[in-house]
Amino acid sequence: METLLKLGADPDYHAGQLVRGALSRELNVTTPRQLARMLNREYMLHWFINETTTVTQENEAAMSEPPMFINNLSATLRLRVKPSSVQATGPDVYKMNTDPRGYVCILSYCSFKDRPDLDLEGSRSDVNNLASVFGKMGYTGHAHFSLTAAQTKQVLTKVRDMEVLDHVGCAVFIISSHGIGNEKFLTNDMKRLATEWVCDLFKDSECPRLKNKPKLFIFDFCRSHYKEQLYRQASAVKCTRVKEPLQDIMCIYSNSGGFMSHTFNKNGTPFTRALCRTLVQHAHNKELGELYREFLVEYTKMVPATEPQLRNLGFTKKFYFNPVTTF
C-alpha cells in the first residue's frame, strides 16, 4: 500500500482486467472509488493521496451543476412511494402543487480531516435512500459529501440564491454528521457550524425566494464516544443572529439535547431508515404533525430508548408533502 501511495495511486483510474466480467457488466464498477462505494467502504479512499483533490473537484462540480437529484448508487431500501390522490387546500394549508414539489439539499459529513476514526460508515446509504424517496415523490435537489465549513457556507449560499426556489413549494435541508451539543455539527475540516446559522440563512430577509414557503431542517447528528474529543479538537465558527423572527421553519432532530442518537452502520442510521419508511407509507395522505407521530412509532421500533425532537419556528400552517408519482 505504501508503494501505491508513493506512486500517486488514483482512485478514479480504470482498474483494467481486475474489473472485467461481473464487476463491470452487472455492477458497472470500473474504478477503485466505485468499488469502495458499492461495498460501503469509502473510508478506503483516504488511502489514496489524490483523494483530497478529487473530493474538492467533485464538490466544486456539484456546486456548479443545474438542479438535479444526485443518486449515483441504488438505494438499500426498496420502497414504493404512494402518490397523493387528493391535495389539501385552504388558507391554513401550505400550497404544495408545484412541479417539482420541492428542493432538497443533503449535506452528509462522512469523513473528517486527519481523523479516520470519526468516519461515518454507511452515510452514503442514508443519502441514497433519501435521494430515492424524495426523487420518487417528485422533489429535486443536490447531495454533497464531506464539505469543509467554507464549502458548506458556499453551497448553502448558492442554494439560497437558486432560481429553482421560485418554482418549488418547499425546501428540505438534511444534515448528517457528528453533533456537538444539540445545535452544532462537525464539518470535514473539524470545524463546528451552528444549526442556528443554517436556519438564519433562509429567513425571509435573506431568502425572499422561500418567503411564506415551508422550510424543513432535518438534523441527524451521531453523538458517540468521540463526543469529548470533539469538544477539545473542533474549532467553532462564530455565528451571530440578526434579530428577526424565523418564519415557516420546522426543525427535526434525531435526538434531544440530553440523549445520544444511534450511531451509523453500513446501512446508515435508524433515524433515516425510519424517516424514509414513514414518508413512503404515509406522506401521501398525512399532515406533517400526523406524519411525525407515525415516524416516532417507526423509529422507536428500531431504537426503543430514543428521544428525537421537533421544533416549530413560525410554522403556522398545515403541511403535506403531496408526492406526485411512483416508479
Image (cartoon, grey):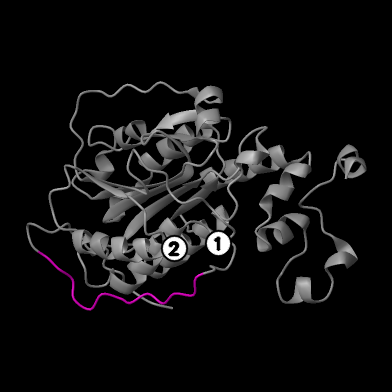
Observer able to see residue 161: no
Q: State the residue at coordinates (37%, 59%).
A: 304
Q: Residues within 10 Å of mark 2 (few under 14, many from 20)?
A: many
| Left or right, residue 279 beside residue 179 | left
Residue 121 in the image: state x and y as whole percent.
60, 52
| Left or right, residue 282 beside residue 145 | left
Residue 196 in the image: state x and y as whole percent.
32, 32
Look at the magenta stretch and give its main secondary structure.
loop
Q: Which residue in the protein does label 2 denote?
A: 273
Total numbered labels placed on residues in the image: 2
Residue 47 in the image: state x and y as whole percent.
77, 43
The answer to the question of whether label 2 and label 1 lie on touching residues, with beta carbons closer than 8 A, is yes
Q: Give the residue type that dot 1 points to.
A: Asn
Q: Which residue in the protein does label 1 denote?
A: 267
- Determine if the magenta segment contains residue 78: yes
Does 270 appear above or below 107?
below
Marking on residue 86: none
Q: Nearer the viewer, residue 111 or 13?
A: 111
The span picked out in magenta is 77-89
Does 80 appear above or below 52?
below
Q: Nearer the viewer, residue 18 or 296?
A: 296
Q: State the residue at coordinates (68%, 62%).
A: 39
How far, Cα to Cα, is label 2 from label 1? 9 Å
